[in-house]
Image (tube, rainbow, N blue to C red):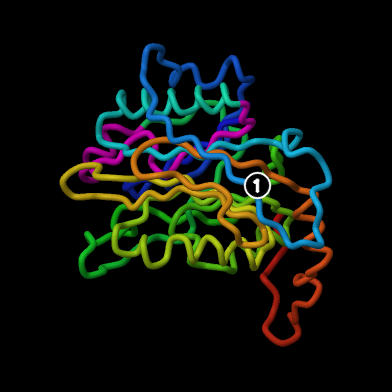
Amino acid sequence: MVSAVSSCRTCSRSHRPRLGFIIRPRHQLLPLLLCPGLRIPRLSVLCAQPRPRAMAISSSSWELPLVAVCQVTSTPDKEQNFKTCAELVREAARLGACLAFLPEAFDFIARDPAETLHLSEPLGSVVAAYRKTHLCDVDIPGQAPMHESDSTMPGPSIEPPVSTPAGKIGLAICYDMRFPELSLALAQAGAEILTYPSAFGFVTGPAHWEVLLRARAIETQCYVVAAAQCGRHHQKRESYGHSMVVDPWGTVVARCSDGPGLCLARIDLSYLRQLRQHLPVFQHRRPDLYGSLGHPLS
């Protein structure tokens, strides 16, 4: 079992929000999180994948890797947050998932920078880490202002895709989804799945959340996995939720209901490769007209 873990929050300028992958055998999954005796809100969903008629399913769907997308409402109470995440990860393992995706700031969402510094601690054994490159500095009517750059340093680089049991994953976080250059660079570097752990607001969420995620999937011909925060974290902050998985055709194949829980989807890389073969958009790009995406990721 591989747990995809994001850590992104308001923090001191000496730290950067990051997304990391922690690898454990299924029976050793994050012992810190595995607290017995907890009741999980069951919101498991497994959706069939609509496909273009010319693209047949090449193998039994039960042979395809299963991924779980967890949706939580993090608060300043770290112990309770970890208990909730533990139950979701345990349920994902019980259902046969090879990857469990947790949202941005799954460990806690603090009320202010001082509380963040008090609650911060290093992650465990990390295979790869991505530090958020695009900071959310917005002031939208009807939604609490967000000025990440006041207390957060942006990451200095894009990380190469990470190999996992479900496919090669390109790492990004929340606000990064508004910048297609990042997703295109990750796809050109070999990504088959893009992940956007997020905490979208209640004004931008209904307007942009699904539209952006589907757009990133279509233009990169990648699966997109977006684990999201939901509900009210404290008196100053609330998140939209609606965690989902989008396939390379742009179809939402799994979606969480309101409230904490998880949804499930199977990743079919043969379908992805067929789609890229039939619709070879990357071969049709014109860097001679609008430039390339920069240096290849190392």
Q: Residue at x 76, y 70 (%)?
A: 282
Residue type at mark 1?
Ile
Expressed as whole percent of the image width and height from the top left, the position of residue 256 reads 45, 44
The residue sitting at the bottom extreme is 289
204, 75: nearer the viewer? 204
23, 60: nearer the viewer? 60
Expressed as whole percent of the image width and height from the top left, the position of residue 246 reads 58, 54
Q: Is residue 155 left or right of residue 135?
A: right
Expressed as whole percent of the image width and height from the top left, the position of residue 64 reads 73, 37
Which quadrant of the rendered structure holds the N terminus? top right
Q: Is residue 173 left or right of residue 108?
A: right
User: Which residue position is annotated with label 1?
Assistant: 169
Q: Residue at x 79, y 77 (%)?
A: 284
Q: Is residue 3 left or right of residue 123?
A: right
Q: Residues within 10 Å of mark 1 (few under 14, many from 20)?
A: many
Q: Which residues are magenta?
A: 96-120
Q: Residue at x 21, y 70 (%)?
A: 141
Q: In terms of secondary structure, where does tag 1 sit?
A: strand
Q: Is residue 119 magenta?
A: yes
The residue sitting at the top extreme is 37
